[in-house]
Image (spheres, coloured by chain):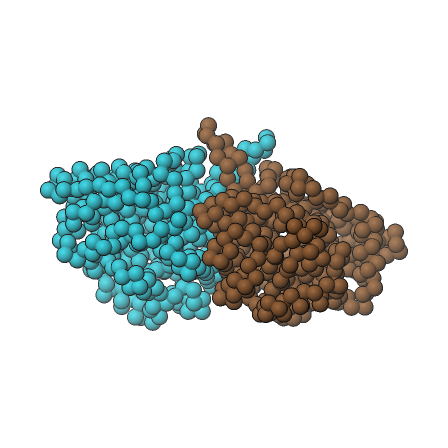
Chain colours: A brown, B cyan
Amino acid sequence: MSKIMTKKILVLGSKGYIGQSLLHHLVNNGHEVIGIDSGIKEKQMENLGVKSLFEPISSNHTKISKLQKWLQTPFPLDVRDYEELRKVVKVFKPDVIVHLAEQPSAPYSEIDMEKSHETLMNNVETTFNVARVVKEVVPECHIVKLGTMGEYGNPNIDIEEGYLDVEHNGRKETFLYPRSANSLYHTSKIMDTDLLSYYCRVHRLRVSDIMQGPVYGFDTDTARTSFYYDDVFGTVLNRFLVQAIVGEPLSIYGSGGQTKGFINLKDVMKCVELIINNPAEKGKLEIYNQYTEVYSVLELAEMVKTAGDEIGLDVKINNIDNPRKEPEDHYFNPKNEKLLELGLQPTKLSKDIIQDMLVEIGKHKLNIDKSKFLPNHSWK
Amino acid sequence: MSKIMTKKILVLGSKGYIGQSLLHHLVNNGHEVIGIDSGIKEKQMENLGVKSLFEPISSNHTKISKLQKWLQTPFPLDVRDYEELRKVVKVFKPDVIVHLAEQPSAPYSEIDMEKSHETLMNNVETTFNVARVVKEVVPECHIVKLGTMGEYGNPNIDIEEGYLDVEHNGRKETFLYPRSANSLYHTSKIMDTDLLSYYCRVHRLRVSDIMQGPVYGFDTDTARTSFYYDDVFGTVLNRFLVQAIVGEPLSIYGSGGQTKGFINLKDVMKCVELIINNPAEKGKLEIYNQYTEVYSVLELAEMVKTAGDEIGLDVKINNIDNPRKEPEDHYFNPKNEKLLELGLQPTKLSKDIIQDMLVEIGKHKLNIDKSKFLPNHSWK
């Protein structure tokens, strides 16, 4: 990467599944990066008795630590603490803030109403504080914020990229695409979108909002991130891979007809880098649908079975009661042209990729806790 | 009102402009009512150096106090304090909760980012706590929540009542009407709507959400409420009436082409009573557009001038710089059929009504603080 593209980037939530990978990826690409994190997720995981299958690793750790030491970044730092956030931003003066400092699990948000409250207030307040610190301290800064494809829910029409042209009684208007989610977590992200749309339109902030589908994988070119396979923090394909390794049936919620747009963790790095290099204009929330391929949960399970059986695993599939409230048979046609237009070359899910991940996970087979696969919590 | 219609009603935010009137109106109609209030608004007004033109009065005060004493209601009580709210709901077991416990002023929310934060966090958390206490303690309870027509913003198409049928690429879907507001306050109300829509759809709460236009007036059949005429808490027509009395020009923001749906405070009472008597079904957020007449700000000013001049006032009109970020010339065609279908007989704004209000306000002329009319805060 040429010197001229180097940016100062603040990553909020830098110890999460995406955050860890991104921190190392950005440092490796020559950016000046600071990551801050509240450490809340570690406490949540401890309380739930779940952990990452392996320790994250990276070759860049020293480089990052030095940078953070020099800047005397308080770490841990909770983005909900506005004064502390403000201090870091005032010293570092980032060109870009990547906002990942949100409670990211739908099942977690539905365990009980206290966790719903925690999710809602954390996600709304961190997002507000990011808007506030940019407005007050670095008004030119580009906010890159992680949203979710789950904000759209399951509409019976095509899902456009963020906005919808409507003709009604002979007149026309373009709206923020109407959102309607199936969990409190996803609803908190809709509320974030409303908030940032407002700050873009009325206070002319510069924000890119990423509607991301479920991510799979753990290795990027520069690091290995934390890897969750439990019912609360594990995304579906990651969980299937671990179940396949220990000979437990892949647990499909309901019929498995739930269809989503998936993306490889490596492609998440590429996408965020593309978005950072193409800052949003002021005045309108820029929205990207960030996924590369559409699969139903059942299709994913069958791909894992085929790939796993071929390397000697005996993979079984089991349909269990769906703990979620979601349609299992629905229209799903989302658009994802904007990142492709910026130059994304998608990594397609293949038997080879699945088998490579299975081999790596197999090395940690003894650390797998089989009791963590099945949903302990239902939101019915 | 017949005995059989008597309900147990908890009014949250019972000391506000709407709350005070509603408390007395509902008691007078035979309901068993408790009002709770945080007292926050009084502190906000003290900090801003503004006050009501006159003390609220009512003939029912003793009756309400006795009821509240018997129930040992903690008062003041902040709805953000979930455990305290829960205690009251557990003892009282309301059939209806009227949720007015929100920071209600757009200008207040834009004074600075601290007040934006206060507005956002208060409104989101009180709304969450209302949903929570109903879900956990009184799942059959009907939540009646005050929203605002301002959530819709100024779309170039007709504003339907809450939902919009969309045809797109040959397929159809009905969405929550897409919202896009012009202040942080109004945005917080959009976020409330998203939250309650979620709790209705997925957790089957029973909620009516009222999209209310600007209210004018101070007397209902049973009480006189607080009356604000300052730039922060005073609604536009109320402010014009007070300006007319002291001979100050009616201050129009910009061209005055801003067009809104207005409603008389007396009709607010009727509307809320109609909604209470027609509980929402579980599973879908019931939305009412609560206004009776559409006027531009300039038209209102001209009506006040005509009515005022006729009773010997010399009313002037002055266009000042618009402190808000809003279109001053826009399409505006909102629907309001649902309350009319339930039987609402609207009180139309007339010269007589304006003159009656002017006469009453005239009695308090000496208490009017002329320095509070003009906007001290701009959100540009």
Along the line of sight, the residue nearer the viewer: A115 or B28: A115
The answer to whether residue A278 is visible is: yes
Q: In this view, does A95 lie to the left or right of A29?
A: left
Q: Is residue A62 left or right of residue B120?
A: right
Along the line of sight, the residue nearer the viewer: A240 or B281: A240
Q: Residue at x 59, y 67 (%)?
A: A71
Q: Residue B136: where, in percent of width, then height?
A: 49, 63
Q: Is residue B62 above or below residue B206?
A: below
Q: Is residue A317 left or right of residue B146?
A: right
How many marks on residues?
A: 0
Q: Residue B279: where, in percent of width, then height?
A: 41, 50
Q: Residue B106: where, in percent of width, then height?
A: 37, 51
Along the line of sight, the residue nearer the viewer: B228 or A128: A128
Q: Which residue is drawn at 45% across and 69% down?
A: B83
Q: Residue at x 63, y 70 (%)?
A: A69
Outermost top residue: A170
Q: Residue B59: where, in percent of width, then height?
A: 20, 60
Outermost front residue: A3
